[in-house]
Amino acid sequence: MSEAFDVRYTAKLARLELTEEEVAKFQAQLSQVLHYVEKLASVDVTHVEPMAHANPVVNVFRDDAAAPWFNTTQALANAPRQAGQLFVVPKVIE
Amino acid sequence: MSLTSLSISELQQKLRSREASPLDAINALEARIATVDGRVGGYLSRNLEAARQLAATADVNLPLGGVPIAIKDVINVSGEPCTCASKILKGYVSPYDATVITKLRQAGAIPFGRTNMDEFAMGSSCENSALQRTANPWDLTRTPGGSSGGSAAVVAADEAFAALGSDTGGSIRQPAALCGCVGLKPTYGRVSRFGLVAFASSLDQVGPFTKTVRDAALVLNVISGRDPRDSTSIDQSVPDHTTHLGEDIKGIRIGVPKEYFVDGIDPQVRSAVDAALRQYESLGAEVVEVSLPHTEHAVGVYYILATAEASANLARFDGVRYGHRAASANLLEQYQRTRAEGFGPEVKRRIILGTYVLSSGYYDAFYLRAQKVRTLIRRDFTQVFEKVDVLLSPTSPEAAFKLGDRTDDPLKMYLADIFTIAANLAGISGISIPCGFAHVGESRLPVGLQLLGRPFEESTLLKIAHAYEQATQWHKERPAL
């Protein structure tokens, strides 16, 4: 499995730009980590349910009621760029 | 004797008898920080003015009235930075309080100072901080542990009465062990995660660093409880965790997992932990050997699940709403460059690993399989807790290691957490308390004893930890700074 690991492709999926140096370094380091975690393949997990959380809580409901929270000024307070009441980003549509 | 060497309980006596004021406490901390933090480097920032204002009006009769508490730089405090020790959050100012901060304030505590950490809580030595290096107060050439290394160091160096940290795979217990203080990881769901910047949401838990077990109980009392803003916090009644402190522990059953006493443990750590076991026997506890057969897989499961969750959680750092934004021609380039410039190497590695184990074609083999092995690890604990009250082990296989020793070997660094990780996977509670010293050259390095308890039975865990603490003198030792 770890032989198929392609750091360049995975970084693209993760929206991370890597330098050539990082590509070489991470490819080697993460291949080693993947090789280590591959020993999980030896565990018998037949009829074992996967576990997503430590506590088996399901369907946590609350009332559908509005409560005080950020106003627009607070929500925009840390924006790198803003205009009016909006976050400004580079053009998306050509 | 300076105020700063006091525990919370001792400080409270002085505050309540008006022998000292909360402002005196803040000023004493400032003086101590000025003397030692240039060498320790535990704090990233402090808002002295805000702390003094709170001190002026603090009600010392509240549960933590007038007590300053340092906060790991991953927990939001309104109006303060929350950098997560990352360049990507440079300049960010929290617009709100985390629930644990709201609860501290309601109990009269004063959030004071932001402590260093591994970037986004990813690491075991604080060396992944993009902002600052923190040294171990017992030997300034060694690491304080991590990820909450700053919180552990400032408590150990008497630059704080107590601190909050977060524990995803050992990030409270391991630095507490390496710095010689008490570190408590509550049961998953005991404490609200709202306002804690998420690393791995199914594993993260906030908890205290303190100088005594009693202080840990005091802080846990305040920060615990169900929070409507965290759907994973559990609606369990919160007892007064100090009630059973001091009770007899005769007949308590202490499990010793044989998988935790393996080759590779430093001999001095091993002998300190063996001595602690004998101490417990002399206090009337019964020591039982038990087995947690899936232990060897915990690190592997952890580095799949924690990185998978991190890759999703850290997707929010895209340069749109807060934090760093790289100059870019289009949105895709903005995402890629912002993250390239903002994140450090360990964060990048973990995002890539997490993305990989979740990606099409590998999800079943890695992520799903790890979730199943997690079930087996949890089952191991459920079964042994039918036979014993707590489990005992070293917190870390060795005392503090040298700064720079492992920064280029991620796998070796990951194995530093070998004894702490399983508790997060199983969601149980755990504590590290001082149990002796390892002597390396001229240095005396603290050794930590880990006790793991049943979910939501922190009271029992603390009672058993307290019995050992009171029978020994280790918690009174302080580094010479």
Image (cartoon, rainbow, N blue to C red):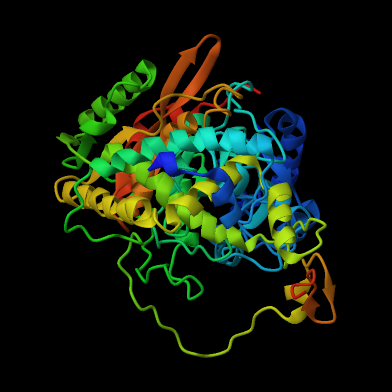
Q: Is residue A1 visible?
A: yes
The residue closer to the viewer here, B380 or A11, is: A11
The residue shown at (42%, 32%) is B415
Q: Percent from the top left, x then y, of residue B31?
A: 76, 37
Instruction: Please identify the quarter of the rendering in which residue B82 is found.
Output: bottom right
Image position of B419 with respect to B306: above or below:
above
Q: Residue furthest top?
A: B441
Instruction: Please identify the quarter of the rendering in which residue B64 is found.
Output: bottom right
Image quarter (top left, top right, bottom left or bottom right) of the N terminus of chain B: top right
Q: How many marks?
A: 0
B181 displayed left or right of B98: left
The residue shown at (46%, 48%) is B216
The residue shown at (72%, 33%) is B37
Q: Percent from the top left, x then y, of residue A9?
A: 56, 50
Q: Percent from the top left, x then y, of residue B443?
A: 54, 15
Image position of A24 with respect to B160: above or below:
above
The residue closer to the viewer here, A70 or A79, is: A79
A38 displayed left or right of A78: left
Image position of A94 with respect to B111: above or below:
below
B58 displayed left or right of A62: right
Q: Percent from the top left, x then y, of residue B187?
A: 37, 56
The residue closer to the viewer here, B420 or B366, is: B366
Image quarter (top left, top right, bottom left or bottom right) of the C terminus of chain B: top right
Q: Is residue B462 visible?
A: no
